[in-house]
Image (cartoon, rainbow, N blue to C red):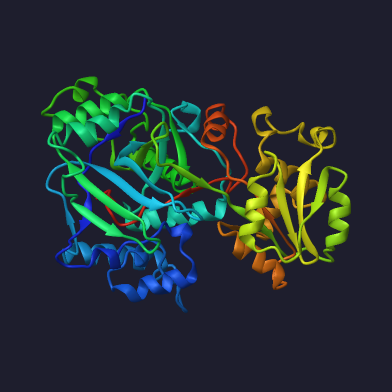
Amino acid sequence: MARLYPFRALRYDPARVNLEAVVTQPYDKITPAMQQRYYEASPYNLVRIILGKHEPGDDDQNNVYTRAAEYLHDWRRERIFAEESVPAIYGYSQTYVVPGTSETRERRGFIALGHLYDYADKVVYRHEQTFPKHKSDRLALFKATRAYCEQIYMLYSDPAFTAEKLIFEGAFPNGFDDNPADLAITDEYGVVHKLWKLTDPNLINLLLTAMADKKLIIADGHHRYETSVAYAKERGAQLKLPLNQPLDEDERVSPSSLPVPAFPEAAMMMTFVNMDAPGITILPTHRVVQGIENFSSPDFITKASAYYTITELEDESPAPDLVDTLTNSSTDSFLAVTGDGNYLLTPKPEAITPLLAGLPAKQRQLGVAQLHTVVLDHILGLTEEKVRALGSIQYLREAAEAVSLVQSGEANIAFLIKPITLDQLKDVSLSGEVMPQKSTDFYPKLLSGLAIYALD
């Protein structure tokens, strides 16, 4: 069963800071330029905790992780962060324009603590591979700060919209849309984020009960989730408490009692979004390859032609036109952008099928899985191990950026791909399969700094 919990969050005091100047995008989406901008925006910007700067002379006693812990401690002491007086969950909405279009969407969900499960427990499911280096970095940060400043983005399925009705209708009988949000800010991408604090124990217990039978799929935050599970196991062993200690079921129905984790590390902060609701957007993550010795575009096209029908496009096509061409092509097609030209590659089923035999059945029809297996691994010799070790692939949201890196000579070749659909993700994930790393890019990202789960 999926165990969820309310919590007493640490939150920025809006009387002490400008909220728009202190929140950030998730740590793995922060570029060096963004990091610098966040540093300059406010001395209390969360980037100092979640992705601080390394400094000359850093050692075991003074480093990016110890400084993060000091910032958190000092800001709590100074009341920059104030702890909520009672446990709560938080309704969360994001209103945004879909990139590359004029379409406005709203994505609704809620923030709560989620119990940490091994994948083998078949409660939480992943959908893509992770990188060990990223996990070791997050573990060091968690141990130093003993706080979760960022949320995991979790998907679940509920065609009846039970949680939404409880949160966005039951909590506001006079109308949700007219109820002022506790927090409303606009991020650097123009996304409007709103938060509503919900503290009614009756409503909270109804929500937790409604979520108990749900299967959860990680949309964003695989590295943080897996790191947190490892951390929870470590702490559970120290405390001699099992991670999956049974929960007293009476707690779920008693209005005067709200459930809590068996120990603080047994849960982490998550945002839960119903995948049956409107508002979810998945963008493609394009691949840019660099550092291949003696790379030759003609040689690549010759080799690829054994497995793909090659259609050469106009050399000067701008990135939006290339994306339009890709969008209108067959399901599994992708674009190869080289210094000598741009090419649409459409699979020859009889040729690629033998190479896909090692893939799980549900992934053989996914363009991104075919790209990794046939092109990156078989044609270019970039095995998964090499990719992890050499960092020879950049993963980019913007097609224009991918194209420019090739045109400038900074990269050998770029592959523009189509986004995974929500149905494909659900099908692959719930079957226990795992897609290549960076197979999805959910938009918009959850803001970091809206709430913090402090373990102490």
Residue 433 appears in the rendering: yes
Residue 380 appears in the rendering: no
Give percent across and percent down for residue 250. Answer: 19, 20
Residue under the point 24% across and 20% down: 249
> 73 or 282: nearer the eye?
282
Q: Is 27 drawn above or below residue 156 in the view shown?
A: below
Residue under the point 23% across and 67% down: 18
Residue 292 image-quadrant placement: bottom right
Residue under the point 60% across and 63% down: 400
Give percent across and percent down for residue 100. Answer: 51, 55
Q: Is 390 drawn above or below residue 233 in the view shown?
A: below
Is 329 on the left or on the right of 420, as rendered?
Answer: right
Picture quarter with the N terminus: top left
Give percent across and percent down for residue 355. Answer: 80, 37
Residue 255 image-quadrant placement: top left
> 49 or 170: nearer the eye?
170
Residue under the point 72% across and 66% down: 316
The residue furthest bottom is 56
> 79 or 145: nearer the eye?
79
Is 187 on the left or on the right of 296, as rendered?
Answer: left
Give percent across and percent down for residue 218. Answer: 46, 39
How many numbered circles are shown? 0
> 195 or 176: nearer the eye?
176
Is 244 on the left or on the right of 91, as rendered?
Answer: right
Is 213 on the left or on the right of 286, as rendered?
Answer: left
